[in-house]
């Protein structure tokens, strides 16, 4: 075959391989929506034509690719295939495998919580990727020869269970140990272990959502969680709405999409092209990158993001926000929303939401609050004052997979006005939504969510709340915030550490500043912090992160494990001293 429309053999007939190749190429091009351009295969004789050329199929009578493949492939053994499938779906095997796996996981968790393991099992990508491929593409048990035989034997249940636990141990030996009390890194928690069992129920039975009838119990659970958390945040019962989606980034995007559609009218159908003046999004200057990313996705453009001025505590300054909004209104610039933070990522600063809400109400601007991290402080009588005014926001994001200590991902988006629930999307999908029961549309998550098929993400939160009540969430919030305050006190008391702020929540930023660095130029100090952090992380002794304050890198901890103690954090300081001494020699 030469890539055109000529297929040839010296004897004047198409080979089976040539016919299949021609059909596959034709089908591929037509699948892409292209004209195949191949026409009908022609015969070109090289030399004298045979007296009786063998039959050649006209294109209209050419066997299908499927039929031709059946002719050259071995017969399909349906009975054997069903035997393999039956093993994979066996409830008895599942029961035994789950028991063995839970024993493996419990033993691992016990060692991690006892601080007997590394926090991060650091390996370079060039090491881990080949290992993952090797394990994945090794010889399956079903293809391994049986004892004393030359042919493959069906794997025994014991072999499969042993291999399952072996693979699980390999996974655990190469991953991040979030449940270590010495993990003080990103805003990802040591999730409540029992929550994973509720998620297991949903995962094993593959409970999904998009329309009510595909996930009736998942829908009921999501609504129950949204109602309970929304009321905890301060929204009035039966007046607000909400949804759960896969992460705070999607939740922020969906909330700001609703703000854009409400603020700009027919933008969903007509787009933003040619709109003058160009709309803007006003955001907390330290807002999570997902907010700026949303501006790009929504078609506003990241150049149209206006950073709200901050006060000395790195919170939005309401007075300067008033000046910003007044100036934009005077120039006729459309304002999609003000995006406030509760709390902002670098140091955990909570905006004064009551005052920010007053400014937004005065200028009739949508108020969006990214409370992905700090929203669950509403469960704590001691700290919920940091969220005062959040119930006045038009949209609020709150992640259960952060300070509610649930497995990822379970991000909630709330609308103060339940009518805005349908504001983000204006589409129809007749193959999904049943016109005979329009009342069910209220419960079809697909009409309000960017995701169509979506995992039942609320089972873990619902299950833990059902077991322990909301007090457990308050306990975990208060334990981690109190531990962060204790760490700050340790930093203040040490003459070789520089705490950079008073913590409002469980985030603490600081520098390690031994005497040798006191007179060093800023660039040298900054490089030292980065190298020090890298050394600690790769050692596996602790896990912490870095962030930038005033354009300079600093060390940052977030207490995301309620089992972390001040002694663990004293150990972190000693570890930093030990690793730092190496760089100071």
Image (spheres, helix red, strand yellow):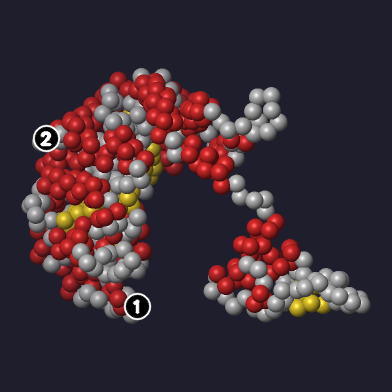
Determine which residue is flagged by label 1: 273
**From where the camera sits, is residue 459 visible?**
yes
Q: Quadrant of the N terminus?
A: bottom right
Residue lying at 17% horizontally and 63% vertically, measured from the top left: 439
Mark 1 surroundings: few (<14), some (14-19) or many (≥20) residues within 10 A: few
Labelled pair 1, 2 in contact (Cβ < 8 Å): no
Q: Residue furthest right?
A: 48
Name the spot of residue 153 as percent of width and height, x first. 61, 32
Q: Nearer the viewer, residue 130 or 102?
A: 102
Q: Nearer the viewer, residue 85 or 545?
A: 85
Q: Is residue 214 left or right of residue 133?
A: left
Mark 2 surroundings: few (<14), some (14-19) or many (≥20) residues within 10 A: few
Residue lying at 77% horizontally and 66% vertically, measured from the top left: 15
Residue lying at 74% horizontally and 63% vertically, measured from the top left: 17
Quarter of the view holding residue 47: bottom right
SS for callout 2 = loop
Question: Above or below — where is 405 with respect to 296?
Answer: above
Q: Is residue 406 left or right of residue 183?
A: left
Question: Above or below — where is 450 with respect to 276?
Answer: above
Marking on residue 382: 2
Quarter of the view holding residue 559: top left
Quarter of the view holding residue 578: top left
**From where the camera sits, is residue 510 visible?**
no
Residue lying at 14% horizontally and 60% vertically, measured from the top left: 418
Name the spot of residue 208 as percent of width and height, x first. 32, 50
SS for callout 1 = loop
Name the spot of residue 243 as percent of width and height, x first. 23, 53
Q: Nearer the viewer, residue 556 or 408?
A: 408
Q: Is residue 330 left or right of residue 54?
A: left
């Amino acid at each position: 075959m030469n890539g055109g429309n000529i297929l040839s053999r010296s004897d004047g007939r198409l080979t089976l391989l040539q016919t299949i190749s021609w059909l596959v190429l034709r089908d591929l091009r037509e699948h892409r929506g292209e004209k195949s351009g191949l026409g009908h295969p022609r015969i070109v004789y090289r030399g004298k034509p045979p007296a009786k050329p063998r039959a050649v199929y006209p294109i209209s009578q050419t066997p299908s690719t499927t039929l031709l493949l059946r002719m050259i492939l071995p017969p399909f053994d349906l009975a054997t295939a069903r035997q393999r499938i039956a093993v994979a779906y066996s409830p008895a095997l599942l029961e035994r495998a789950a028991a063995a796996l839970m024993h493996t996981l419990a033993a691992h968790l016990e060692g991690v919580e006892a601080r007997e393991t590394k926090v991060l099992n650091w390996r370079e990508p060039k090491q881990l990727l080949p290992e993952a491929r090797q394990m994945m593409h090794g010889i399956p048990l079903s293809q391994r020869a049986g004892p004393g035989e030359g042919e493959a034997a069906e794997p025994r249940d014991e072999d499969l269970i042993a291999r399952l636990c072996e693979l699980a141990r390999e996974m655990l030996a190469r991953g991040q140990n979030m449940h270590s009390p010495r993990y003080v890194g990103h805003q990802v928690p040591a999730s409540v272990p029992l929550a994973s069992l509720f998620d297991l129920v949903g995962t094993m039975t593959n409970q999904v959502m998009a329309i009510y009838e595909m996930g009736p119990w998942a829908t009921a659970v999501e609504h129950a969680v949204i109602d309970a958390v929304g009321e905890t945040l301060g929204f009035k019962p039966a007046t607000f709405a909400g949804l759960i989606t896969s992460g705070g980034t999607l939740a922020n995007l969906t909330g700001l999409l609703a703000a854009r559609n409400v603020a700009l009218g027919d933008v969903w159908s007509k787009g933003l092209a040619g709109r003058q003046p160009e709309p803007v999004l006003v955001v907390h200057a330290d807002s999570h990158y997902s907010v700026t990313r949303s501006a790009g996705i929504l078609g506003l453009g990241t150049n149209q993001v206006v950073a709200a001025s901050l006060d000395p505590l790195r919170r939005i300054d309401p007075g300067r926000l008033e000046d910003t909004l007044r100036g934009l209104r005077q120039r006729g610039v459309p304002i999609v929303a003000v995006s406030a933070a509760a709390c902002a990522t670098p140091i955990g600063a909570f905006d004064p939401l009551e005052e920010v809400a007053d400014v937004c109400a005065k200028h009739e601007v949508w108020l969006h609050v990214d409370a992905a991290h700090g929203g669950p402080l509403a469960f704590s009588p001691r700290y919920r004052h940091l969220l005062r005014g959040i119930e006045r926001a038009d949209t609020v994001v709150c992640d259960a997979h952060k300070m509610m200590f649930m497995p990822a991902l379970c991000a909630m988006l709330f609308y103060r006005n339940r009518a805005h629930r349908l504001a983000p999307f204006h589409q129809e999908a007749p193959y999904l939504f049943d016109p005979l029961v329009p009342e069910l549309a209220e419960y079809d998550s697909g009409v309000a969510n960017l995701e169509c098929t979506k995992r039942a993400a609320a089972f873990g939160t619902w299950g833990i709340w059902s077991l322990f009540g909301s007090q457990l969430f308050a306990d975990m919030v208060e334990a981690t915030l109190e531990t962060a305050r204790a760490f700050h006190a340790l930093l203040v008391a040490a003459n070789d550490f520089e705490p950079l702020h008073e913590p409002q929540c469980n985030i603490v930023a600081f520098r390690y500043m031994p005497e040798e660095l006191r007179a060093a130029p800023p660039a040298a100090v900054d490089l030292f912090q980065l190298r020090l952090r890298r050394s600690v992380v790769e050692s596996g002794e602790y896990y912490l992160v870095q962030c930038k304050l005033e354009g300079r890198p600093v060390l940052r901890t977030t207490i995301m494990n309620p089992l972390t103690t001040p002694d663990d954090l004293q150990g972190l300081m000693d570890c930093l001293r030990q690793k730092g001494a190496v760089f100071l020699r």
